[in-house]
Structure formats: structure tokens, C-alpha cells
Amino acid sequence: MTQDFSDGRLFIGGDWRKGRGAPITSVFAAEGIENQTLAGASRDDALDAIAAAGAAQQDPAWRDLKPHERATHLHRIADGIAANIDRISWIQSRDTSKTLAETRALALSAAGTFRYFAAVVETSDDLLTAPRGVYLTSSVHEPLGVVAAITPWNSPIASDAQKVAPALAAGNAVVLKPASWSPLVCLELARIIDEAGLPRGLFSVLPGSGREVGTLLVEHPGIAKVSFTGGTSTGRHLAGIAARKLMPVSLELGGKSPTIVFDDCDMDLAIAGVLFGIFSSSGQSCIAGSRLFVQRGIYDRFVERLVQATRALSVGHPFDPRTQVSSLIHADHRASVEAYVALARDEGGEVLCGGARPEGLDAGAYFLPTIIAGLDNAARTCREEIFGPVLVVMPFDDEADVIAQGNDSDYGLACGIFSNDRRKCWRVARAIRAGTVWVNTYKQFSIATPFGGDGASGMGREKGRAGLRAYQTQKSIYEDLGGQPHPWARWP
Ligand code: NAP
């Protein structure tokens, strides 16, 4: 493919210029080669971006736009993404080693996200509320100011769009800090947004160290909200800073989601759902169904078929259209996944398949889809997020047992249920602590449907019509209709 990356400049306060921070390197882990090293953003770059964002957000050219006028900006950005799908997909596959099919879907979903929030902002109403006197009461929605969006490396363009689109639609400015492992596709998004004609300064992209640039953004008084997606420990740390600042923060964090297979399920449906739920994206997905509970009556048969199907998955290069499981994002990340598989063995787990690097793909950071049995839900392997192609499988007795085991986790992000009994599915769906539950399917997504987690999986919801409100504050206005001085205020 004859594509290339950008020239390495960052998009800071409306200017394209070299960063002044430490270098960051994007690698194509599938081949073990470097994509590009660029000078990352420095603290000074972040200060420039915040200052430009604050001024641009207050500029009447943006501040006074009507919702339908802001919507036209979002439509232009969506058009720009749609016109560059192949390029975005290629860059993101190089940045993350995800398959082209997946990065194409992510780019299309990003375009859809901008269109969705254009529609939402244009069709959202302020409130006329019930008065208790002779006055008119309304409650209007206003932007917060400058929003910092901090995103992880696993699905950059989609998670970026999920924050940037509603934040801009709501009338804010946005400073985006992507993960250091995946800076390139976010800079491509900046190019598209710049070319779409968004007023200067309203959007910046600061690839740079999370500890340095990320922390500065969260602490800075010019940032009115932080919208964070990433690991639970980082999220906790940022929430602490936000609490001291009394700043709203939304947190989309990690998961250890249960998939529950009852003995009355459609087995083909369940096997396909389990495979896709854990092994797509090579398991590098917050919502990965990484704990599998299978009812005891079908446990042996189901696990045997699942292992067979897992062995048949096509592990390979992200540009090969046959590939189902590609390389992990980075050799360091594979090392972390390998350490978890070693831990599982130490804990007494039995590796039913995988558990090793595939043969013939030595240059890349590949790891075979892995299934581990013989562990109790209390094992660390079953409690900690591995974020790789590793599934633990455990038996359960009945509905009450699986609800107890499923909920016995710090996380509360997602859950899959497979059964032909709809009433049972409904009961379990309501009893499980999770932001999203899939019944007889897994990993389906609609931008119109709220998404988020509970417990260690975060707080707040993205997507859906209310996703816009997460970037606004409400102002209530009382307007006198009677024309009479207030009776309390008597004077001689
Ligand atoms: P991470 O290490 O927490 O990093 C996420 C982002 O935070 C990166 O941009 C990172 O920058 C930045 N960061 C790190 N330390 C920071 C600090 N002290 N202050 C401010 N920013 C800081 O997570 P990750 O490894 O990139 O992503 C994987 C995690 O994301 C997994 O736990 C996964 O479950 C979670 N995730 C959740 C969702 C969801 O919607 N719930 C979706 C996707 C991923 P650097 O890259 O420069 O360190």
C-alpha cells in the first residue's frame, strides 16, 4: 500500500508545529518495525493548546453559533473522515497492528459518531419548567469550556470521536491527548478537522507523556472537564486530582467481563459469541468477555468445541484479509500478557490451547488465542484485566450461582448471556452489575445506546442523546411575568 504518515508535526492551538517534548515512537508491532518517531508535546505545548482553546471557545465566532450551525462543522468533519477511510484505516492498522477490516469499521464508526452528535445537538431542547409563581422558568444547557480528552491505544479513532464529537457539539473546545503508543491516527484526525474548517484553536492534539502532559491537563485550572478512557489505576489517579479541583470527570475504565453460557443455549450462537467476545482485537478490548462461565451439564462438550474452534482461528498479519487474530500492539504488551499466562500456570490453571507465541510469525508481537481452565474465580488470573487473547473458563451450577460468581469482581463493564430462555436472560441481565449486557450476541454497538461501566470500570456514560449533556452545564433562568415588586420588599 502506498501510504505515508504525516510529517511529524503536532496540531497545537491551530498551528502545525514540532513538539517540544520527549520523542515518542509508533511501532508496527506486527512486523517489529518503527513507523515514525516524533517529538512529543511538552508541558509548554500543552499550555499553548489550553490558552488557544480557552480563547477560541470564548470567541463569538464559536460561542454564538446556534446548535444547527455547530452541527454543520460536525458534518464536515464526518465527511472528511468518510473521504479518507482507506488512509485512516491504514494508519491505524500501522499504529495498532489491528486488522484493516477492524480499523476500517472503527473509522466508519467515528464518522457516524460525528453525524450522530450533529443530529443530537440540532434536535436537543432546553427545558421550560413548571413555575410556582408568576414567572417563567427555563433551564438552558451551556458548554463547560475547555475539555481535555485523554484516550488509550486500543481503538483510538473511535474512542477519540466518542469524546471530541459530543464535546464540540456542546460548544466546548477540546484538547486531545492520545496514548503514546498510538499517536499517528489522532494526528490524521487533526488534519481532517483542520481541513474541515473548525475555527482555529478549538481543537489540539498533544501526543506526549501521560504522566507529564496528561497530568498537566487534568490539574490545569483552564480545563473544565476531563473525559478519560484508559486503565483503572490511571483513572483513579485522575479522579483524585479532579476531586480536589471539583471538576467533573468521566471515566471509561477496564473490565473483566463475564460471559454466561446456560445449558439451554444455541451452542453455535454461543461459541461464535464467546470467540468474538474475547479473541477479536486480540483481546485488547475493555469489553472483552474474558471470564467464561459454562453451566455444568454442557461444560465438557462446550469447552471441547470451543477449544477446537479457537485452534481454527486464523492468526496472522493485519493486512491479510483472512486474519482474525492479529499481533498485539507492542512487544512490551505481549510480555505483560505472557506474564499473566505464567501466573495462571502458577495458580494451578491448565492451558487448554494457546499459551504461547505462534510459529512462523517471529518478527511480530503475536500471541496465540489462549483458554485456561481449572481456576477458581478468586484467582488473580480471573480478577485482573489481562487485555490480551486470554480466556478463563469456569463451570457453574445454576442461575443464582452464576450471578454470584459473575458479580464477584471489582469491575462492572459488560456481560454476555447465552440461553434460549428469554425470561431467564432478562432476570440475569438485570441482576448482573454491568453497564452493557448482550443477550445471545456480544460486542454489538450503537452510538445511540449509552455506554459505560460501574465500580472499577468507571463512572459516567458516553454515547446516546445524553452523551451531549455530559459536556454541558445547566443554567436555570427565572423571568418575572407579573410586573409587581416583590411583596417582601416594603419600604415607607
Ligand atoms: P492507560 O495506561 O491508563 O493510558 C490511557 C491514557 O492515559 C493514555 O493516553 C496515557 O498516556 C494517559 N495517562 C497515563 N498516565 C497518566 C497520568 N498520570 N495522567 C494523565 N494521563 C495519563 O491505559 P492504556 O494502557 O492506554 O489502555 C488500556 C486500558 O484502557 C485498559 O484498561 C482498557 O480496559 C481501558 N479501556 C477502557 C475502555 C472503556 O470504554 N471502558 C475503552 C478502551 C480501553 P501514555 O500513553 O502517554 O501513558
Image (cartoon, rainbow, N blue to C red):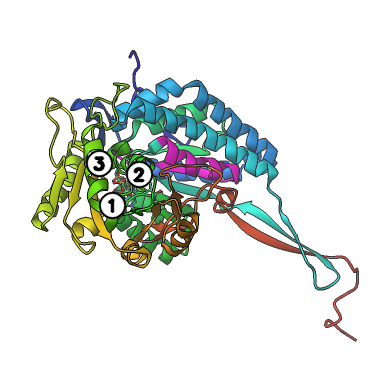
> Which amino acid type is marked by label 1?
Ile
Looking at the picture, does residue 96 appear above or below residue 412? above
Residue beneath label 1, please?
A: 298
Tags 3 and 2 touching, CB below 8 Å: yes
Tags 2 and 1 touching, CB below 8 Å: yes
Residue at the left extreme of this rendering: 346
Tags 3 and 1 touching, CB below 8 Å: no
Helix, strand, or loop for circle 3? helix
Q: Is mark 1 within 8 Å of ligand 1?
A: no
Chain part drawn in magenta? 157-180
Q: Residues within 10 Å of mark 2 (few under 14, many from 20)?
A: some
Q: In terms of depth relative to the viewer, which is nearer, 463 or 200?
A: 463
Q: Position of residue 129 (x, y in %)?
A: 75, 63
Q: Earlier in the sequence, mark 3 or mark 2?
A: 2
> Does the magenta run of residues contain 161?
yes
> Which amino acid type is marked by label 2?
Met
Q: In terms of depth relative to the viewer, which is nearer, 178 or 115?
A: 115
Q: Position of residue 351 (x, y in %)?
A: 14, 47
Q: Residues within 10 Å of mark 1 (few under 14, many from 20)?
A: some
Tell me the tag on residue 213. none
Residue depicted at x 51% and y 28%: 194
Residue 410 falls left or right of residue 461: left
Q: In terms of depth relative to the viewer, which is nearer, 258 or 465?
A: 258
The quadrant of the rendering that contains the C terminus is bottom right
Residue 188 falls left or right of residue 202: left
Residue beneath label 3, please?
A: 305
**Within the image, what quadrant is residue 41 found in?**
top left
Residue beneath label 2, please?
A: 267
Q: Earlier in the sequence, mark 2 or mark 1?
A: 2
Helix, strand, or loop for circle 2? helix
